[in-house]
Structures are given as structure tokens and as C-alpha cells.
Amino acid sequence: MNELPVIQKTYDFVKWVVPILNKLPRHHKFMLGDRIIKEVYDLLEGLLRARYAKQKLTQLQSLNSELDVLRYQIRLLYDFELISLKRYQYISQQLQEIGIELGGWIKQQKQYNKNHYQEKVNLN
């Protein structure tokens, strides 16, 4: 399937990180692990919904803030010594790449909205 890069990267991230989170110690899995799992699934779902939305910008900006929450949750995994430095660095890199793709999509939508508004003004 030919997906938008941000959707494909997020999908691949979900496939990679969920099995790791499911192996967390019991007392962390049911709070932090489950929250992170919910966040990554919500992020993927939100990106898929945004792809079909007429007004994408608001949804994308909301997803950008969710991505920031996810970054802090992952940082907590590392600070609680639940993942290694190497794994933390890899996860951070993946989230950075998703963020870059998402930021590009937001920028593109801002430009589209600006151009669309200009066209309406010029028609009146």
C-alpha cells in the first residue's frame, strides 16, 4: 500500500514499539505502558482520519501536541530505567522523523489554506 510517509512511519513505529511495551514489568505496563500504547494507536488513527478530513490543519496541529506528550512518556520509560539508552535513542529518532513529516504536512496545509483564502478574496 502506498501511504503518506508520516502514516507509514507511524505504522512501522506502532508495530515495533507495542511488543516492547507489552513486556514492561507489571507495575509499569498497566500505567505507563498502556498509556503509551494508547497514544501511538491514537496517533496512527488520527493521521488516517486527517488524510480524509476537509479541514486537516486543526487535526494535524492536535496530533503534533499528542506527539509531544508521547515524547515525554518515552522519556519517562528511560528515566525509570525501563528501556536502554540505545533503545531510547532509536525511539527518539523515530519520533523525530514522524515529527518532521507531520510538521511538513502542517506547513503544506497552512500554505494551502493561505492560497485558498487568497483565491476567495480575489474572486470577491
Image (cartoon, grey):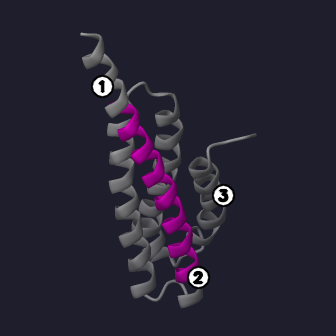
Q: CA distance from mark 3 to mark 2?
A: 15 Å
User: For the residue marked with disc 3, what is the amino acid?
Assistant: Asp
* Magenta stretch, overall SS: helix
Q: Secondary structure at mark 1?
A: helix
Which comes before the other along the chain, label 3 or label 2? 3
User: For the residue marked with disc 1, what is the amino acid?
Assistant: Gln
Residue at 36% from the left image edge and 63% from the top image edge: 68
> Is residue 103 part of the magenta span, yes or no?
yes
Q: What segment carries the magenta color?
A: 87-113
> Is residue 13 left or right of 35 when viewed as pictured?
right
Q: CA distance from mark 3 to mark 1?
A: 38 Å
Give the number of the disc on residue 87.
Answer: 2
* Marks 1,2: beta carbons within 8 A: no
Residue at 61% from the left image edge and 72% from the top image edge: 20
Give the number of the disc on residue 12.
Answer: 3
Q: Secondary structure at mark 2?
A: helix
Pick the residue in front: 123 or 56: 123
Q: Position of residue 36 (x, y in %)?
A: 45, 63
Q: Which residue is mark 1?
A: 118
User: For the residue marked with disc 2, what is the amino acid?
Assistant: Arg
Residue at 60% from the left image edge and 73% from the top image edge: 23
